[in-house]
Image (cartoon, rainbow, N blue to C red):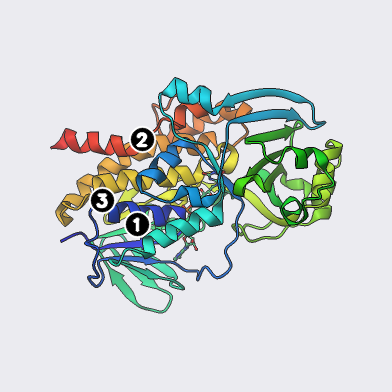
Amino acid sequence: MPLTIIVVGAGLAGLSTALALAQNGQSESKHIPNLFRIFEQSSFSNEVGAAIHVPPNATRLLRRWRLPLDTLEGVKCTRLRIWNDKEKYLSTPVTTAEIQVKTGKPDDWLLVHRVDLHNILRKAVQNDPATEFLLASKVISVDYEKGSILLADGSRHEADLVIGADGIHVRSPYQIESRHRAYIHNGTELLSFFDSHIQCSGQSRHSRFYEERGHRWARSFSSNDRRMVIYPCRNGELLNVVAIHPATESSDVGKSYWLTTGSIEELQHVYRDFGPHLRELCAIAEDLKLWELSSRAPPPTFVKGKLVLVGDAAHPTLPHQGQGAAQGFEDAAALATLLDGNTMPEDIPARLQLYNSIRYPGALTVMFMSMVHEEKRDSLMEKLRQFVPRAEYPESMFEYSWPSDPQHDGIHALQSIA
Ligand SMILES: Cc1cc2nc3c(=O)[nH]c(=O)nc-3n(C[C@H](O)[C@H](O)[C@H](O)COP(=O)(O)OP(=O)(O)OC[C@H]3O[C@@H](n4cnc5c(N)ncnc54)[C@H](O)[C@@H]3O)c2cc1C
């Protein structure tokens, strides 16, 4: 009989953890009441989001979980290219092929729309008859000793294990520290928008980006304190533009994730000194979303009693390295490997400690290295070492994160205690 499991939150981390666990034996592909339940506060009626990078450490896992990545119409990213704010080309710091050769791992770097990725994960999880998917079910507290949750409707539910996957605006990590972990604002905010003009009419005014629409690379245009990162998704027919600048530059900062709407006037004002094609792109921006880039101090551990944290609930990761979702997938792979179908309830404490030792140092390293732009990363090593004393500075984040394979780490950890 598999373990009874509750997952709090059906974002990318919660869904992938549910899928990986089900595929690794924590599901008997038939309905047994209360075996495997996912509680999600929203009803997913109006899903929004930007395009995201799915780096090779993530595509490797998504393919192992047999997700139909081809249906995402993702763009295989071949390189990152850097320009200055006046549109002068400077360098190509990374090509996918070069890292693939260096690390000996052939996996793709994909650019996809977050909603498309979420949809295929959700479909895969919902297809498992053993999983109960409970939408509009807000969890208001978690009891890590009992393995129980309390819902806003007053009902209480219990399981052998509770997986906290409720993201940065969370309940479950409070149980680990018994205190509120304050937001850390890093003084920048981020506007993201789609250039759907290309998709709608094919008659773009900003000819430079229109002509390049079939290209398969991410581009970054930077001045001293602000930058625009542009990359395609959906077969190259949609351009996603991410604009990162000091928070003081704009007025309407919201903490809401994916939902706060930005304004074109604000965008044009902040990027008024950028080159003409970039300014033109700002003028026709559609579907603007505004985020204040904030994180939280990490918890001292990802596990306590019957509670384990995955994804942003464990390590809220900013988008500078394009690794936040990927780290959630890595959590899912590690946890599912350690909690296979033969795991008994009495095995859980030791398995969760293995999970923590596999995931905590690496996930926190990526989290801290993602708090600032690439060139300022070393300034965060001291803070990182307060949590991971033996952390070493990753010279290249691509070479650090792309070869990571927590499924293999989990298998080795199990062999070491066998
Ligand atoms: C602008 C931007 C760009 C990004 N770009 C990239 C990128 O290129 N590559 C990358 O890998 N990452 C990127 N990230 C980061 C990535 O999106 C996140 O790290 C990832 O989505 C976190 O997933 P999650 O499932 O842990 O959390 P979330 O996506 O926040 O999901 C949490 C879920 O829990 C639910 N929930 C919350 N509280 C409760 C509750 N009390 N009860 C029940 N349910 C609850 C929420 O409704 C939600 O569905 C980006 C982030 C931003 C903001």
Left or right: 319 with respect to 173? right
Which comes before the other along the chain, label 2 or label 1?
1
Which amino acid, mark 1? Answer: Ala
Q: Residue at x 49, y 59 (%)?
A: 119
Disc assigned to residue 24: 3
Residue 263: name its quadrant. bottom right
Q: Position of residue 332 (x, y in %)?
A: 36, 48
- Mark 1: which secondary structure? helix
Q: In whole angstroms, how far apart are the C-alphas of marks 3 and 1?
A: 10 Å
Which amino acid, mark 3? Answer: Asn
Q: In whole angstroms, how far apart are the C-alphas of marks 3 and 2?
A: 16 Å
- Mark 2: which secondary structure? loop
Quickly name the residue at label 1: 18
Q: Is residue 69 above or below residue 365?
A: below
Q: Position of residue 103 (x, y in %)?
A: 42, 23
Disc assigned to residue 177: none
Q: In whole angstroms, how far apart are the C-alphas of marks 2 and 1?
A: 18 Å
Quadrant of the drawing holding the N terminus: bottom left
Count the numbered circles shown: 3
User: Front-most of 370 and 145?
Assistant: 370
Quickly name the residue at label 2: 405
- Mark 3: which secondary structure? loop
